[in-house]
Amino acid sequence: MNRDIEAVPKKRRAVSLQEMEDHKLPWQYRDACADILIPLNVCRRALQYRPWRCVDLRHAYESCQFDRYNKRVEAHQKAKLEKKLGKSLSD
């Protein structure tokens, strides 16, 4: 079995909307982590969704989603604090 299909991309890159459409990515998954999700879905299909395969790609995708969640929470908390203090913290 070719292990290259399970390799995590070395560099992150922006994925075009056309590429997302070509890979039939649902609109709710078209975010900053799509560059990892596309190879993950290719790997899953090629290896018939075996749960013990594509583990590194799945972990990279879940880590990306978790990091994005933490950034949203941090931004929300900052906005809430700014509203409470009545000024901008970025000054």
Image: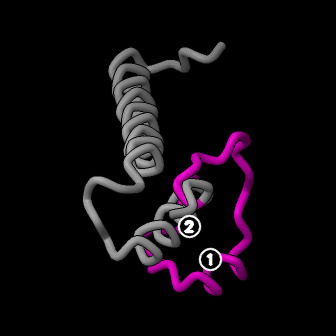
Residue 3 x/y as whole percent: 55, 54
Q: Nearer the viewer, residue 7 or 40?
A: 7
User: Label for residue 38?
Assistant: 2
Residues in magenta, as a range = 5-32
Which of the labelled discs sits on residue 20, or is there none? 1
How many neighbours does mark 1 have within 10 angstroms: few (below 14), some (14-19), or many (20 or more)? some
**Residue farthest along the left direction in this orientation:** 51
Among numbered discs 2 and 1, the one appearing first in the sequence? 1
The amino acid beneath tag 1 is Met
What main secondary structure does the magenta stretch of the protein show?
A: loop
Across and down, in percent, residue 41 comes to 46, 70
What residue sits 39% from the left and 15% below the top? 85
Q: Are marks 2 and 1 in contact (CB under 8 Å)?
A: yes
Eyeballing the image, is 2 above or below 62? below
**25 is within the stretch colored magenta:** yes
Residue at 41% of width from left, 38% of height from top? 63
